Amino acid sequence: MPADPRQGLRFGRIPITKVQPVLEEGKFPAKGVRGADVRVSAVIFREGHDALGATAILVAPDKSEAQRVAMTPGAKGTDAWEGVLTPDHEGLWTFAIEAWGDLYATWAHNAQVKINADVDVDVMLEEGSQLFAAAAGGAQDTDPDAAHVFRQAAATLADASLNTIDRLAAGTSLEVRAAVARFPLRDLVTRSQEYPLLVERDAAGRGAWYEFFPRSEGAMRHPDTGEWTSGNFRTARNRLPAVAAMGFDVVYLPPIHPIGKINRKGPNNSLEAGPQDPGSPWAIGSDEGGHDAIHPDLGSVEDFAGFVAAARDLGLEVALDLALQCAPDHPWATEHPEWFTTRVDGTIAYAENPPKKYQDIYPLNFDNDPAGLSAEILRIVRLWIDRGVRIFRVDNPHTKPVWFWEWLIGTINAEDPDVVFLAEAFTRPAMMAALGRAGFQQSYSYFTWRNTKEELEEYLVHVSRESPGYFRPNFFVNTPDILTEFLQYGGPQAFKIRAILAAMGSPLWGMYAGYELYEHVARPGSEENIDNEKYEYKQRDFAGAEAAGKSLAPFVTLLNKIRREHPALLDLQNLSLHESTDEATLVFSKHKTIAATATGPERKDTIIVVINVDPHSMREGEVTLDLDALSLDGLSADGTFMVEDLVTGATWNWGKRNYFRLDAHLEPAHILYIRR
Amino acid sequence: MPADPRQGLRFGRIPITKVQPVLEEGKFPAKGVRGADVRVSAVIFREGHDALGATAILVAPDKSEAQRVAMTPGAKGTDAWEGVLTPDHEGLWTFAIEAWGDLYATWAHNAQVKINADVDVDVMLEEGSQLFAAAAGGAQDTDPDAAHVFRQAAATLADASLNTIDRLAAGTSLEVRAAVARFPLRDLVTRSQEYPLLVERDAAGRGAWYEFFPRSEGAMRHPDTGEWTSGNFRTARNRLPAVAAMGFDVVYLPPIHPIGKINRKGPNNSLEAGPQDPGSPWAIGSDEGGHDAIHPDLGSVEDFAGFVAAARDLGLEVALDLALQCAPDHPWATEHPEWFTTRVDGTIAYAENPPKKYQDIYPLNFDNDPAGLSAEILRIVRLWIDRGVRIFRVDNPHTKPVWFWEWLIGTINAEDPDVVFLAEAFTRPAMMAALGRAGFQQSYSYFTWRNTKEELEEYLVHVSRESPGYFRPNFFVNTPDILTEFLQYGGPQAFKIRAILAAMGSPLWGMYAGYELYEHVARPGSEENIDNEKYEYKQRDFAGAEAAGKSLAPFVTLLNKIRREHPALLDLQNLSLHESTDEATLVFSKHKTIAATATGPERKDTIIVVINVDPHSMREGEVTLDLDALSLDGLSADGTFMVEDLVTGATWNWGKRNYFRLDAHLEPAHILYIRR
């Protein structure tokens, strides 16, 4: 008896290839979020003409099988299969795929074709009867209803007193197909290896971020002397209720540490700071302390704790900036010159992009003393975690070695998997992808510079379908560093359009204070706000603007309310594009099926966004919906369904093709909810 | 002292990602051919602005380092790097990539920019001096010439008596750059893992194939009775000198085994064979024997050996068909019914694609007795290897499980790595790719159905740049199963065009006898020759046609001669496209640099093919060459170079832009050799 040749081969009985999301054959885990859908796909094929099926299988961190989902085939000829898995709690899960010969589909196809052609009629009926008889035996214990259906089909197929048509019909009835869907008739079952899926908490993949400078909130200028009194954590707390009321989840603070006094930058990035200029918070460190200290103007450790607690009471998390660079007077510069690059003249190298110089900043060097510097940064991160921070927005991670982030985030998350890191990297695609693989839970993205319908379509498909295994984009509409031309010249409607795109297009979005006031004047020659808050205190009258009807805050509030009421908007991988006849009108939808629970039935949540992305025009045309993406099964007999515009409250009957008219100066978008 | 945080991480100091050719992280080896160039690429990047370099490293089967090649960067922003490695003998090689900080490029860039801007002049000069002084020490043992250059540069840079311009120039001279190219100044050297590269013999990846039916060669019809006498291995030997004279490397024979008598097919695939009809050689097996036997009409085992020896004496290898299927009267059908599928009525299932039936063929079933059936097939393959066959053309491999091929080819190649398998699979891309990964050395391809310029451009790029790691296409221009519409209706010029495309476009190409006679009439409704040789004897007057000037054989001979004289044509991964203004004129080039050896200097071989792929027209226009792809460095001062048309012998001076005029009815193509 020869040995089984199949042992130790790389190909299984049915090849399962190109499994996604898989990073380097599972060397890195793919990213998931508690309760969020994960699209699992593979290319699966077999020899010959027989049918096959595929099942996606989710395995919980405790190794128990948590979910089995039938995969569906993709476009003809691609051999692509796809299914959606939904892990329901945090941890390191795995998933696998089973491929199998579909005995029922093979028989049903052959029997129908051959009996129609009057070929092998008796053989096909008898083959069906035997197939169902065997299936009945197999299903008896786990699905007695299916077993009953199979037994009846077997009997009718074998009943020579009936005519051929009726016998065949018994094997291909809706009832049989439903039973087969529950209890597939499988052979040659082949299982892939298991691939890792790291499921993280909500804040890793969902949330609305609001950025503000605590020193500005409550800052006052003496009317006579012109001298400033800085805002601080106690005065800044007063801003938190309004932020919470707008529906934000995260308050992100630029660095709160002492600011360098040597080579401090003045207003509008000028080289000379006056005695009253507070300096850039990103120039960290002075004789008042370094990354472990709090700027004396902002208050004490207790004041910070009070700020964090006040935020928490309002349902807000505080995200802190982690900017690993130093002002020349940072304590490390004298205590640990080996953590910097020393030039041949004995001075420490400042930051530069020759010939540009940034003399207020010393970059760190991770190669002279990797162990010592890493240990100190770990100490600092742990310190802020102890002080209540669970989210870090990391400044310029792409200027540090990638290995360092793999180590730091891996070390911290091993101690506390709830800590979230956002990568502020605007650089080339390879580095941005690597930072995601290295462990960053989320990343700033190119969204900021994707403005046209075509650009947005391409980018939305990329982030929702191609890269979510390693990259969770946070769609910031602006930052202290970025005021795009689209916002500078698009008028208030441009601010509205970009907020809708961000809040509806991504489960993570963010804005920096002042956006709601349509602050749109840039420093000439730059892509930053003029009189930038990075170098100055900023007093803003949010309430006054709102009272005068000159604030986007009410609309932002509506967007965040819609997000909270519609779970489809808080998933990343569920976006589909639809067609419109207008070149500036983008149409996308997000759909989520929420499984039945002990307390409620299955629920379907679907949002369709139709948006005119040209802030200067009125657009009209026809939308053609991809109905398959909307999971409409059984919704209506005539192919129409009711949609509700969540902005205006209007309702319409929509179908496959629908007229629209969107005036950017009135409402640039429909945000439509499918009523079921 | 904290532990080194870098231990055990997945990211190295400089990330090296997306290395190619790598199949599933090295689970399968990439394919290589002795002496053929392998394009190695990766996405490599680092933090910050400093320059980096990369080296591709080839490691021989004995683990010695065989080659180090500087990689060159790709398009800006992609972080892509590429290099070409050339393994020089067969075996399981590996390759790796080293990435490193390029100290010289970083300094030279910064020094030039900063000194031009009058920033940090002294520091940059001193930094350069120290850099070269250290480099001189490092290079002293291995490259004393470079060390000398570095020492001089260090001295001049440090010489404060000279002016700044001269000091800087000493650090950026051509001499310094040449020394740095030989002895790069590297830091942070990071090495990738090693990836497998299976290097196989010439015949795995190079060769011109000629297919003919030995029973036709010497077959005679009795003028009175109309009865046929079959050709045999002794008469078929007479055809071999002409095949060799045309410059072919491989003679491929359809199955030579006994042919089933039950349900034998007659002329033109008719269901009824007459007593004189020889049947399809692919319906294997009868009472005269199975896959281990030779058809009695063809002769004995000794006759076959004589045929193989005669071919070998002419420089031809014999490729045998391995068609794993049986006629109903194959001995296995009675001795091993478990190797087939038995239907519920007790009969063995014939081949079918419902409702079509192929009652002359029983397909094998690999699931009932995988060990027994596999062992028998292994026995048969070994038997034919013992009888002198080293190349198998495998019929319909996509109708057998992929694991079987992984096992069979793996087992045979472990015993004899010179045995080559060609996959005759015309099916969906996923299966074709899997068969390549499973071990098939070469594959039939979609070339047959790629006719327009656009289709050909896309396909040539795919096979030469995207898939060569797992797929070596054999460009057959026709087969007994395939006579494309292009050939049916394109006239003799269509045959010429397709032969040029195949022979010049791919290191592997093939034709089936009769192509040189422009046989172009199809059986109505099919894509096969009428009166197909699969079911009949075929007498052809090759010599008469040639004497009458009605044969493509002389041109085929020229094509194969050009191939043998130009190694560039025998590599797969060295094809580049060029532009032409005409929509039917395709332009591609193949370039190979042959390294210097003990007996000769470095040599560059470059062929440019300009071909009108519309057989019905005259085309003219302008070719724009991608000069970078032609490795012209230093060829001429005025940007022109001499090309010789290997078809007509004409020579021209060509440059970046060149006029062409190609009349398909005269010569449809220029095959240009760059004279150096």
Image (spheres, coloured by chain):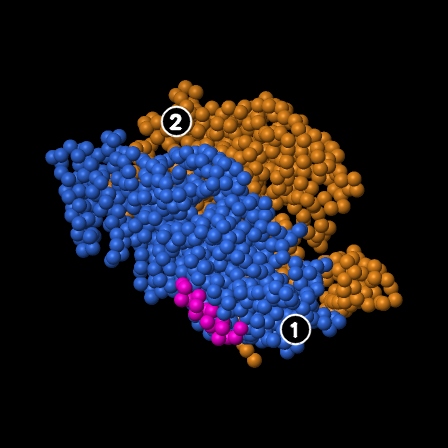
Chain colours: A blue, B orange
* Residue drawn at 84 percent across, 67 percent down: B159
Q: Is residue A307 magenta?
A: yes
Residue A482's place in the image compared with B461, above or below, is: below
* Residue drawn at 65 percent across, 58 percent down: A268
Residue that mark 2 sits on:
B268
Q: Percent x, y for residue B184?
A: 70, 62
Q: From which residue to which does the magenta span run? A: A299-315
Near-viewer residue (B216 or A341): A341
Which SS class for mark 1?
loop
Near-viewer residue (B18 or A588): A588
Q: Split into 4 quadrants, where in the image is the N terminus of chain B?
A: bottom right
| Three-letter code for the amino acid on which mark 1 is drawn | Asp
Quadrant housing residue B215:
top left
Whether residue A163 can be seen here = yes
Mark number, residue A603: none
Residue that mark 1 sits on:
A329
Quadrant housing residue B357:
top left
Most common secondary structure along the magenta stretch? helix
Q: Split into 4 quadrants, where in the image is the C terminus of chain B?
A: top right
* Residue drawn at 53 percent across, 57 percent down: A541
Whether residue B97 can be seen here = no
| Three-letter code for the amino acid on which mark 2 is drawn | Asn
Q: Is residue A388 magenta?
A: no
